[in-house]
Image (cartoon, grey):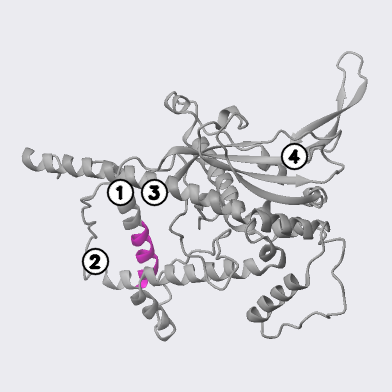
């Protein structure tokens, strides 16, 4: 259930959440009126020509504002077409809704079976993940067959690849800082990992995926809910006593309007920090003066700070009751929604990209496909803006006009990318959001 949604740049993040998943379709007909533009008379034609650039730019912004305002006013409102239909036709409309209900039931069943199929193949891959972990930790030596298979793949990808010497044995110490390097080579996670975090993440020995199980061993809040958890296993370190940190993601039980599972919420492990080692806080020393005795003392205060380990304290979705009661301002809701979407997207990328292709993130190969995917999207975005505009812009230098407004180009999006294989990512049939 890989997603191609960016995780960096919160305003652009659109991972599926209960709040941003629509319950109803947008209106079919918006009935926009055509904006009118006042004519330029002959008397002020020359003056208009002199001010053509600013006028056109201002006019374009004015028209854009009118259209956007009209769209905002009409969004979610009926055009009146459905209401105007005869009762006999309205009965047919309701019948189609009934057919759609049955389609939705079948699609829900299909998605749930896809989830079961993912669970099945994760079990089949477990021995390979265990083998990978043993080589990384130096608990098992790499075999000649494994090395030869890896070199064959390297030659296919790079004709200039130089084979390694055959008379050297693999290091018994495994691969130091493997997971720290792999995580840092993911665009979104690299933004979260501070220099302070890096020293703790050097002790990360494995990252695994598990689907939630039904039964008494599951946490009470996860019983009966589909979802998965990401398991971070650490060796002994100077920062916390936990050997395992987990992040659990729960889906809603029913598939959302988009046809995919919708995230419900996330749960994180309570980290047992050692004294003065909490990486999610910064400490500062302040002087305090006693008003009565005029004596001063030093007070040590903690304040929250950015850290990768905040990942294990996920944001809490607002309840419907809190929203209805107006407990949140609009900007607060928007900020919270962006944080939730980003958190869900990171879990999705860990599940679908980093864990399955950890070696490609360690070597940086995965980044090549992420960059390639972003470039392709930019090219496609430009062509959508209109080839005619591009043709006109090619000849701007030959004209005397410097006031044309250039077409907008979307910046490359972070956190998106192809699989670290020969082909770019295409949405798989059995993906679950």
Q: Is residue 338 above or below residue 371?
A: above
Select label 1 or label 4 by which is in front. Answer: 4
Residue corresponding to mark 1: 71
Residue 363: quadrant of the picture = bottom right
- Residue drawn at x 54%, y 41% as measured from the top left: 227
Task: Please check the rendered image and state whether residue 291 is part of the magenta-colored stretch, yes or no.
Answer: no
Q: Tell me if label 1 and label 4 are in contact, CB under 8 Å.
A: no
Residue corresponding to mark 2: 40
- Magenta extent: 50-61
Q: Position of residue 34 (x, y in %)?
A: 21, 57
Q: Is residue 215 above or below residue 244?
A: above
Nearest to N terminus: mark 4 or mark 3: 3
Residue corresponding to mark 3: 110
- Residue drawn at x 74%, y 51% as measured from the top left: 206
Give whichever of 214, 79 is nearer the camera: 214
Select label 1 or label 2 by which is in front. Answer: 1
Nearest to N terminus: mark 1 or mark 2: 2
Q: CA distance from mark 2 to mark 4?
A: 62 Å
Q: Position of residue 316 (x, y in %)?
A: 57, 33
Nearest to N terminus: mark 3 or mark 1: 1
Q: Residue furthest top?
A: 292
Q: CA distance from mark 4 to mark 3?
A: 41 Å
In the visual, does 373 lie left or right of 390?
A: right
Give whichever of 387, 414 is nearer the camera: 414
Disc 4: CA contacts within 10 A as few (<14), some (14-19) or many (>=20): some
Q: Tell me if label 3 and label 1 are in contact, CB under 8 Å.
A: no
In the visual, does 408 lie left or right of 195?
A: left
Determine which of the numbered discs, if any, sits on residue 280 in the image: 4
């Amino acid at each position: 259930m890989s997603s191609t949604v960016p995780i960096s740049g919160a305003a652009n993040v659109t991972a599926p959440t209960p709040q941003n998943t629509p319950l109803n379709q947008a209106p079919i007909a918006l009935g926009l009126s055509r904006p009118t533009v006042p004519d330029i008379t002959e008397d002020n034609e020359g003056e208009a020509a002199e001010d053509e650039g600013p006028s056109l730019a201002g006019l374009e912004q004015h028209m854009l504002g009118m259209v956007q305002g009209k769209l905002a006013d009409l969004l979610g409102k009926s055009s009146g077409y459905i209401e105007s239909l005869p009762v006999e036709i309205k009965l047919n409309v309701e019948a189609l809704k009934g057919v759609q209900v049955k389609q939705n039931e079948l699609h829900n069943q299909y998605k749930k079976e896809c989830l079961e199929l993912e669970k099945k193949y994760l079990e089949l891959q477990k021995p390979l993940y265990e083998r990978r972990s043993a080589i990384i930790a130096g608990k098992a030596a790499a075999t000649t067959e494994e090395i030869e298979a890896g070199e064959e793949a390297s030659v296919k990808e790079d004709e200039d690849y130089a084979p390694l010497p055959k008379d050297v044995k693999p290091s018994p110490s495994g691969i130091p800082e493997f997971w720290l390097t792999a995580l840092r080579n993911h665009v979104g996670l690299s933004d979260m990992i501070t220099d302070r975090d890096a020293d703790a993440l050097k002790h990360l020995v494995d990252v695994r995926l598990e689907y939630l199980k039904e039964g008494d061993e599951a946490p009470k809040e996860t019983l009966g809910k589909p979802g998965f958890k990401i398991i971070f296993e650490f060796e002994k370190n100077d920062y916390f006593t936990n050997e395992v940190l987990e992040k659990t993601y729960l889906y809603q039980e029913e598939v959302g309007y988009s046809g995919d599972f919708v995230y419900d919420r996330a749960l994180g492990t309570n980290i047992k920090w050692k004294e003065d080692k909490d990486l999610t806080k910064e400490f500062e020393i302040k002087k305090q003066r006693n008003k009565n005795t005029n004596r001063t003392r030093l007070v040590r205060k903690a304040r929250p700070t950015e850290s990768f380990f905040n990942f294990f304290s996920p944001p809490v979705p607002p309840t419907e009751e809190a929203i209805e009661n107006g407990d949140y301002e609009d900007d607060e809701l928007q900020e919270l929604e962006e944080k939730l979407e980003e958190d869900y997207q990171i879990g999705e990328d860990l599940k679908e990209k980093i864990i399955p292709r950890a070696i490609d993130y360690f070597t940086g190969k995965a980044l090549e496909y992420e960059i390639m995917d972003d470039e392709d999207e930019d090219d496609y975005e430009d062509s959508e803006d209109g080839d005619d505009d591009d043709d006109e812009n090619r000849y701007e230098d030959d004209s005397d006009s410097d006031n044309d407004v250039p077409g907008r180009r979307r910046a490359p999006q972070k956190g998106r990318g192809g699989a670290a294989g020969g082909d770019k990512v295409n949405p798989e049939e059995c993906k679950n959001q």
